[in-house]
Amino acid sequence: MSLSHHTALLQDGRCPECAESLTARALFGRGPCKRCGADPAAYGTTDAAARFEGRARHTTWIVALVAGLAELLVGWIPLADVVVALGIALWIRLAILRPAVAMMSPGRRLVTRGTARVLVGALLAALLVVSQLVTFLGPLGLPIKALLGAAEVGLAAMLVTRYVASQVEREAAGKPVEGAEIGLLVAMVLLLLGTAFAATFAVVSVLGAIQEFFGGVP
């Protein structure tokens, strides 16, 4: 087997000797292959972190364009935004999150997956709220919804890509998961729950006030 083939396997996240998938520790040269015991570091280093970020950024612009077109085509259908948002969330999970966490240790994988999911959920929830408000503009709201949809989806994908790429880089450098990362995840969850509670309380209060007003009208 040629040296170039060994290197190609390593760049693909596989053991240069047995071609089995490497653990995060072995992939970044901090341990042997669990299958055959080969030392991947003897064949060079992997640029998995940089390759992941470049590939994810390239496809981010494509999904933003698709999201904008979808909003433009189906934006007039009630709650069609929900379908678009679910499709975008699935794409981010499969194209960005899953291949990245596969390169991480269990602890970092858990923190990264949780933080990314909360971030995506919050951004897509904001997209749904804003897009539904825009429907009150009538036909003029369709192009605005398309632009907002593309912008928010692009923002969500870029933020998740940047965050996940930084986590892959930390994994490559052998840095442990810090308390601040866990604290950020907990804070985001609490903020999201608090926002949902406040929004629900506001809607119930407004509906109660409307009911009381019309109930008092003779």
Image (tube, grey):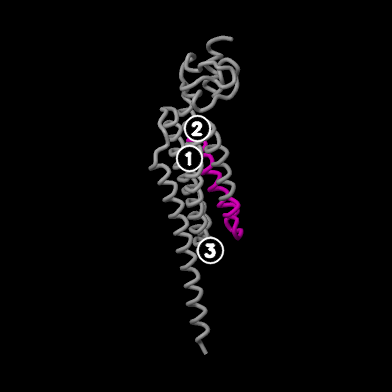
Residue nearer the viewer, 218 or 18: 18
Q: Amino acid at mark 2?
A: Met
Residue nearer the viewer, 205 or 173: 173
Give the farthest residue toward the left.
180
Magenta-tinted stretch: 55-84
In the rendered image, which quarter contains the N terminus?
top right
- Which residue is rendered at x = 50% and y = 35% of the image? 56
Residue underneath mark 1:
112
| Percent of width and height locating residue 175 | 40, 31
Per the rendering, the mark at residue 104 is 2
| Percent of width and height locating residue 124 | 51, 51
Residue nearer the viewer, 32 or 101: 32
Q: Residues within 10 Å of mark 2 (few under 14, many from 20)?
A: many
Per the rendering, the mark at residue 138 is 3
Please tell me whether residue 71 belongs to the stretch shown in magenta: yes
Whether the residues at callouts 1 and 2 have beta carbons within 8 Å, the answer is: yes
Query: From what the image shows, is residue 175 above or below residue 71?
Result: above
